[in-house]
Image (spheres, rainbow, N blue to C red):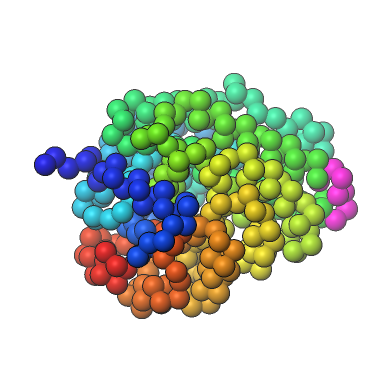
Amino acid sequence: MLKAPFGNDPGKIERYAAFWSRADVSRPMVGFTMRGWFPLEEYAATRAWPVNAELTPDMVVPEAFLEDEERLLQEGELLGDDIIRGDMPAAAAIPWLSGILGSRLRILPGNVLGEDRSASWEEMEALRLDQANPWFETYVKFAQALVRHSGGRYPVSHGALVGPCDILGELRGHTQSILDILEEPERAMQALWRATHVFDEVNAAIWQHLPLWRGGYFDGMYQLWAPGPIIRMQEDASSLYSPALYRKFLQPLDRYLAARYANSFIHLHSTSMFLLDAFLEIEELRCFEINNDAIGPPLGEMVPYFRMVQKARRSLLIRGALTPDDARLLMDALEPRGLYLLVVVKDAGEAAALRPLLGL
C-alpha cells in the first residue's frame, strides 16, 4: 500500500473533526514537529539574509523556498503521528502584515521583526489595505507558488499575522500606544478598529487564492485542519493591557473577528494568562492555542489555565517541547476531548520516547 505524501492520510481528518467538536475520545490528538522557534534557520534562502539589515520584498523569492519547504514537510513520513502537514508563505519567517502596513522589517538572528514606528494620527486615519503594496503582492505570489508546488499533496494556508493591538503598537510605538489608550481613547479605539478590518481583509483576501483541502480549511502554523472557514487571531501586545482595558478596547475587536469565522482560534503566550478570563468571555472563540514557551513558566504552573479553557468547553491546542514528566503531567491533568498536543522535538528518537506516554 502506498503511503500518503508527508503522512497526509485523509483518514486523519476524523481526529480533527473530533477535536473541533470536543467529541469523546480515548486520548488527545498528538503531533510532533522538528521545526523550532527560529524559522530563518530552516531555509537556505533566509540563512543568506544579512543580520540587522532591512528585509525588502524583492529579497523574498518564493521559488527559492520550495525545496526546503518540501524537505520540512517530509518529517510527517518519519514521525508517525495524528496530524496533517501543510504550509504557509515562508512559514513564520516573515511578519507579512507588518510589512503590508508600512513597518520596516529588521532581520534578526533566526527571525524577522517589524520595527516600531511613530505614525501620526493622520497616518492612522488613512490605515487600509492596499493590494498593490509590494509586501501584499509578494505574500500572494508566495501562496500561489505553494499551491502550484503542492499539487494537492498538502494544504496551503494563510500566514501568521500580527493582531490589532500589535498593529497599533508597531505603528504608534508600543509605549506610545498604551499612552494613547489612556490619553486619546477615542482615537485609539478608531485606530484599533481600522487595524481589525485590515487584519480581516488580509485574511479573507489570501483565501481567494487558496484551495480547500479535503473539503476543509487549514492553518499552517499549527498544522490545524478545520471543517469551516478558519482564522488565526493574535494579541501578543495584550500583555500590556489591564483586564479592564482589554475588555474595553480589545475584546470587542476579538469578538468581531471570531464571529466572522466558523473555526476561529487565538494564539496566546503565558504573558497574557492574567487576561484568560476575559478571552474566554468571547463565546465565538472556538479554540485556544497556548504556547509552552521555552522561556516561560514551568508547565505545572500553566495547567490551571489549560483547565480553565477546558472547563469553558473550548478546544485547546498546546504547542511546545515536552519532557517525559511533562507528558505524564498533561495526560493526568487534562481531559483528552478537544485536546491537541503539538510537540516540538529534536529528532525522531525523542518523538518515539514520548509516543507511549501520550497514548500513541
Residue at left 56%, top 28%?
205
* Left or right: 68 in relation to 298: left
Picture coordinates of residue 113, whole percent (x, y): 55, 47
Q: Residue furthest left?
A: 1
Q: Quadrant of residue 129?
A: top right
* Left or right: 21 in relation to 185: left
Residue at left 17%, top 42%?
3
Residue at left 64%, top 64%?
276
Residue 281 versus residue 307 in the image, above or below = above
Residue 24 versus residue 303 in the image, above or below = above
Quadrant holding the C terminus? bottom left
Picture coordinates of residue 16, whole percent (x, y): 40, 50
Quadrant holding the N terminus? top left
Question: Which one is in front, 136 or 33?
Answer: 33
Is residue 58 among what the camera can see? no
Residue 308 versus residue 221 in the image, above or below = below
Is residue 227 among what the camera can see? yes
Picture coordinates of residue 279, whole percent (x, y): 66, 58
Q: Which residues are magenta?
A: 182-188
Q: Magenta includes 356? A: no
Q: Residue furthest front?
A: 24
Residue at left 53%, top 45%?
263
Q: Quadrant of residue 203?
A: top right
Picture coordinates of residue 115, whole percent (x, y): 62, 46
Magenta: main secondary structure: helix
Q: How many marks?
A: 0
Q: Magenta includes 185? A: yes
